[in-house]
Amino acid sequence: MSPQAEPISCPFCSRVIKNCSGLTQHINRVHFNPNGPSSQNVAAPEDSPLPMGHGPSQCTRESHVVLDATPTDKFSNDLPPDAQPTPQDTAQKNDWYPFTSHVKFETAEFLFTENQMPQSHVDRLMQLWAASMLHHNDRAPYTDSADLNWVIDAIPLGDVPWKSIQVQYAGNLPEPIAPNWMTKSYDVWFCDPNAVVENLLSNPDFHGHFDYAPYHEFEPMGQRQWENLMSGNWAWHHADVLAKNPAMHGAMLVPIILGSDKTTVSVATGQNDYYPLYLSIGNIHNNTHCAHRNSLVLIAFLAIPKTDRENEDTAEFHKFQRQLFHTTLAHILSSLRHGMSKPEVQRCPDGHFRHAAYALAAYIANYPEQVLLSCLVQGWCPLCTSMSNNLDGHGSIPQSREHAEYCIHQFTLAELWDQYGIVGDLMPFTNNFPYADIYKMLTPDLLHQIIKGVFKDHLVTWVGKYLKITYGEAEANQILDNIDRRIAAVPIYPNL
């Protein structure tokens, strides 16, 4: 990355600007635009409502001027503003590697992606094919299904290969007999997340649906507009934090979004259960995420240890479950750590290379996993310190890494558990990564808290009980059936 000039502050809004040219553009675009936002709007946009009825062409956009995703070549040299993308290497017309011929490629594509024939049928097909080629002194494209799968696995492009690790309890074993969960090994399968992110960034299918820098967008009356992750406050504020590091100047912020759901379990052989861990990046637009275009990638199956009923409720086993979860996540994501402090050159959907600065941005999980991720006691809020029996009480503050670490140094484990809801003998996996705070990563659990919790479990149940008390069970059931029919009759409507 080429040397950068010392950042300067805007005299109107104190925004950090990379150079004098950027300061001039910023002032002309934001502060001297009669139809644009005022400086007050830029400095404190949190209260602005979401505008309706204004298309993107009517909005003004202010991009971050330090983490501005400056294009480079693959050797990390900055390119001039009008430079064309570096041409990608293209294969020769007759190069079907690792397939040795066009016919073998077409056969593999048909059997694997279109027909999806069972392996036993592939074996039988290859036997018949080989028999028909004997009098031509030739052979079938593949010997059997194993031969076909071997060639497909040799393709250098596409999905990232899977690998596995074994995790085991490392403490002292009790005498005379240790519980079975202490002596077992737990398999964890995962893909290299750095390679997964590289594939997402270089996918040309996302061109035109991809944000390269954090931005603020305003409609003509100066109201703030939010849509994609890079238009939000987190992306801008995190870019401001990274801008203090000169190595980050000109980089492209790549927010890492994680998600897992223990309810979707894949039962493997033996006694180990697994549940999936997913990854995406916040640069991709929301409508592309919803369009099933492979923007969300399965990167791991996390192990869940099991034991007999005698030990499943012990404090030691619960502690091991938590430690296994956080240790596994820290190991799986470790390949991203280097790119969080020093940007890595990556090809982008538009064909340009840029310095990618990774950041753990969000973790999508239901409430049980949120308290597991934040190392809190079940029943406590992962977002604030309010107690469950006094949510509107005074004196509560947002949960944070600083608050948790302060309490851990001040109180005993019992006091932390009972009075603050903190599991004091466990460290969140995010503590292994720079600038990461699990409490800021957690997102609202809309499905379980709003749709299922408030609407289904509370409101629908309450209405059902009210109708039975008021009208009797028979008439109440008729009313509920009528409500169901009316809801079913609502026509399909986008986003409803």
Image (cartoon, helix red, strand yellow):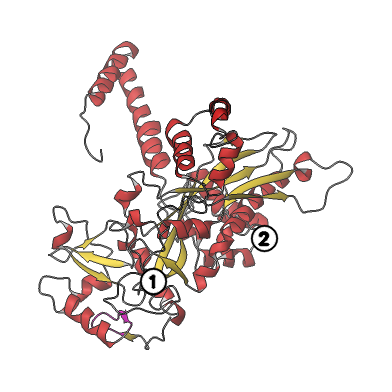
Q: Residue 178 or 163: which is nearer the viewer? A: 163
- Which secondary structure dominates the residues rendered in magenta? loop
Residue drawn at (75%, 34%) of the image: 310
Q: What residue type is labelled 2?
A: Thr
For label 1, the residue is: 239
What residue sits right under mark 2 in the picture? 412
* First-in-chain label (2 vs 1): 1
Q: In which quarter of the image is the N terminus?
A: bottom left
Quadrant housing the C terminus: top left
- 142 is within the stretch colored magenta: no
Rendered location of residue 388, percent (x, y): 48, 47
Residue located farthest toward the top when viewing the structure as drawn: 474
For residue 29, above or below residue 421: below
The stretch of residues the image draws in magenta is 9-18
The answer to whether residue 420 is visible is: yes
Place of residue 274 in the rendered image (x, y in percent of width and height, measured from the top left): 60, 40
Q: Dot 2: what SS?
A: loop
Give the camera-side residue of 344 and 320. 344
Task: Out of 427 and 348, give the one closest to the viewer.
Answer: 348
Q: Mark 1 belongs to which amino acid?
A: Ala
Local SS, label 1:
helix
Residue 246 on image: x %, y %: 44, 82
Q: In this view, does 242 lie to the left or right of 141?
A: left
Residue nearest the viewer, comparing 211 with 237: 211
Q: Which residue is drawn at 21% across and 35% down?
A: 493
Queried whether the magenta region covers residue 17, the answer comes back as yes
Q: Residues within 10 Å of mark 2 (few under 14, many from 20)?
A: few
Res. 68 image quadrant = bottom left
Mark 2 or 1, which is nearer the eye?
1
